[in-house]
Image (tube, grey):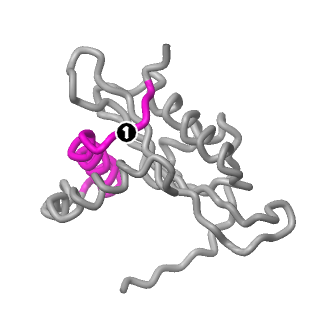
Amino acid sequence: MSLVRRAVPEDAAEVLRLRQVMIDALWSGEGGGPTQWHTESLPTLRARLAEADGDFAAFVVEWPDRPGTLAALVAGTLDYRIGKAGNPHGRVGQVFSVATDPDARRRGYARACMEELLAWLRARGAGHVLLNASPDAEPLYASLGFTRDPDPSMRLLL
């Protein structure tokens, strides 16, 4: 039996906590990031986790000895872009949150969650999957078949 399960609305606070673990790890050296946004984000996340057939999914592993506490999280979406060669239907997976509690690392939890998310994306017809990888996480993604692309992305804050 797999330790991985799809996240449910009752997991929302823990999902936000683990997302903050990821955010803080990305900005290490600058101290922990602000968390006041969690309160505003919580209702939206609960609603999205309730959508069983939506375009968003999160997969989690609970701490075996801490009921109600998550040890690992992977979340992503299925997006639509106009089709192209190799992906005529334009379905693209986007992984944007992969986090494991620091004392739960190296147990295969993130890999197991990623495998579930990738299966979910495949079942929905994703032609490819995008993610941003930290140097520490790149070996995991490479072992799952991800390759590094030249990154021409830009950002505009609205």
Local SS, label 1 = loop
Which residue occupies the foreground of this view, 74 or 142?
Answer: 74
Q: Which residue is mark 1?
A: 7
Which residue occupies the foreground of this view, 2 or 101?
Answer: 2
Residue plotted at (19% across, 54% down): 32
Q: In the picture, residue 89 is in which quadrant?
A: bottom right
Magenta segment includes 8: yes
Residue plotted at (48% across, 19% down): 2
Q: Is residue 138 left or right of residue 156?
A: right
Residue 69 pos. (x, y %): 23, 30
Magenta segment includes 108: no
Secondary structure mostly taken by the magenta-highlighted segment of the chain: helix
Q: Is residue 89 left or right of residue 3?
A: right
Residue lying at the far right in this picture: please name it.
Answer: 85
- What is the total number of numbered labels drawn onto the structure image? 1
Q: Is residue 82 above or below residue 47?
A: below
Q: Is residue 36 left or right of residue 94?
A: left
Extent of the magenta region: 4-29
Which residue occupies the foreground of this view, 52 or 132?
Answer: 52
Q: In the picture, residue 85 is in which quadrant?
A: bottom right
Residue 9 pos. (x, y %): 28, 44
Residue plotted at (53% across, 31% down): 111
